[in-house]
């Protein structure tokens, strides 16, 4: 059986649609690579199967690399290697109410030392939903105040 252009088009559309089930935002680029091969076969119908696979692999990988280099240039940076001193001064949102010397949780917009939700303590009463600032790190707890 010889693969036709519409086989590659269906494969590409299925890969793009499967991104709805697997939300990694990677399959879409392999789907677009399949559509590139479909366009190539539509224009050059005598392209060999090996050439089709090669074009699919190269175009898919090129699209993934382009995505991470152009649109997500700093995505590869890992924040878990940051020191606890770098957490001081970061601003987050208090998830639940906290009483003086009580414990609660604070959520950060970007991961802080590897996590976006942290246990926290405070010397004052703070209502949930308040913006708070990290003033120190005590073991696995962040000490916070109102921002």
Image (spheres, rainbow, N blue to C red):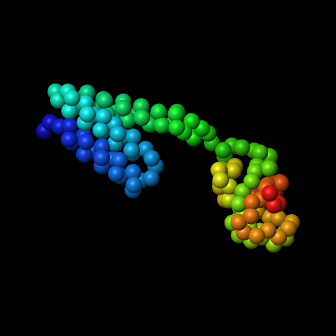
Location of the N terminus by quadrant is: top left
Q: Residue at x 63, y 42 (%)?
A: 78
Q: Is residue 72 left or right of residue 49?
A: right
The extreme right residue here reads 123
> Compared with residue 27, is residue 106 higher up or lower down, i.e. above or below?
below
Q: Residue at x 45, y 47 (%)?
A: 25
Q: Residue at x 57, y 36 (%)?
A: 73
Relative image position of residue 95 (x, y in whole percent):
69, 66
Asked whether residue 144 is in view, the answer is: no
> Compared with residue 53, is residue 109 higher up or lower down, i.e. above or below?
below
Q: Is residue 88 left or right of residue 117?
A: right
Q: Is residue 87 left or right of residue 16?
A: right
Relative image position of residue 45 (x, y in whole percent):
17, 29
Asked whether residue 96 is in view, the answer is: yes
The quarter of the picture where residue 133 lies is bottom right
The quarter of the picture where residue 42 lies is top left
Q: Residue at x 39, y 45 (%)?
A: 27
């Amino acid at each position: 059986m010889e693969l036709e252009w519409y086989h590659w088009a269906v494969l590409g559309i299925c890969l793009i649609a499967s991104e709805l089930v697997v939300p990694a935002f990677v399959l879409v680029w392999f789907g677009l690579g399949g559509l590139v091969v479909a366009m190539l076969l539509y224009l050059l119908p005598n392209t060999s199967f090996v050439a089709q696979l090669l074009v699919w692999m190269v175009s898919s990988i090129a699209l993934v690399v382009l995505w991470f280099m152009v649109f997500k240039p700093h995505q590869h940076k890992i924040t878990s290697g940051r020191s606890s001193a770098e957490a001081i001064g970061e601003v987050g949102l208090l998830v639940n109410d906290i009483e003086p010397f009580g414990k609660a949780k604070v959520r950060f917009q970007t991961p802080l030392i590897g996590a976006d939700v942290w246990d926290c303590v405070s010397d004052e009463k703070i209502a949930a939903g308040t913006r708070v600032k990290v003033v120190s790190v005590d073991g696995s707890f962040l000490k916070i105040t109102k921002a």
